[in-house]
Image (cartoon, grey):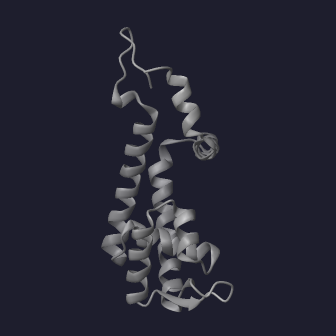
Amino acid sequence: MPEDNNHPTRLADFLPYQLSITSNAVSSRIADEYRARFGLSVPEWRVMAILGDAGAQTQRDLTATTLMDKVAVNRACKVLEDRGLASRQPNELDGRSHHLDLTEAGRVMHGQIMPIAEAMEAEIFGCLSDDERGQFSEILGRVRQSSGDLDPDSILDHLGPE
């Protein structure tokens, strides 16, 4: 966001910053609950949630779906395996990778967490009407899509010469 003398840019007004701190606040609130009740970190829960929704995934798929760093995904997968919540099977289509899937214990835990997650979502977003929640979700989807479509060179072109 360019700055001019009449309207100085303030970080607090910068939408990506607002989105980031809001996301961190919501994630931290939910993570406190998962950590206290189930001993899970945010990355571990995100991996479990994807596996619970979509079934077996490669670590590459998990990294792409969660947009988390591959080291964080790898670490989360290792912890889930060590705890017996997930297991690894060879990928028959690609001998170099494996599919990770929830074990029975992982599916049981996922089933216990989902009602808690949904209740926390209702509590956190209870400040919005049903219509506002729908609009907010739709807007977030559009922003997410737009951010994936950005061409870094076109952004620099709009800034002009240095």
Q: Position of residue 82 (x, y in %)?
A: 38, 89
Q: Between 83 and 1, which is closer to the camera in this rendering?
A: 1
Image quarter where the C terminus lies is top left
Q: Position of residue 27 (x, y in %)?
A: 40, 57
Q: Residue at x 39, y 66 (%)?
A: 42
Q: Total of numbered circles in the picture? A: 0
Horizontal side of 6 relative to 51 (left or right) equals left
Q: Position of residue 93 (x, y in %)?
A: 69, 85
Horizontal side of 35 relative to 145 (left or right) equals left
Q: Quadrant of residue 151?
A: top right
Query: Looking at the image, which residue sits at the far right?
Result: 93
Q: Residue at x 40, y 52 (%)?
A: 26
Q: Position of residue 51 (x, y in %)?
A: 57, 76
Q: Residue at x 35, y 57 (%)?
A: 29
Image quarter where the N terminus lies is top left
Q: Between 81 and 71, which is closer to the camera in this rendering?
A: 71
Give the vertical position of 15 relative to 120 (above or below): above
Query: Looking at the image, which residue sits at the far top?
Result: 6
Horizontal side of 140 relative to 159 (left or right) equals right
Give the vertical position of 109 relative to 135 (above or below): below
Q: Residue at x 50, y 89 (%)?
A: 87
Query: Looking at the image, which residue sits at the far front?
Result: 161
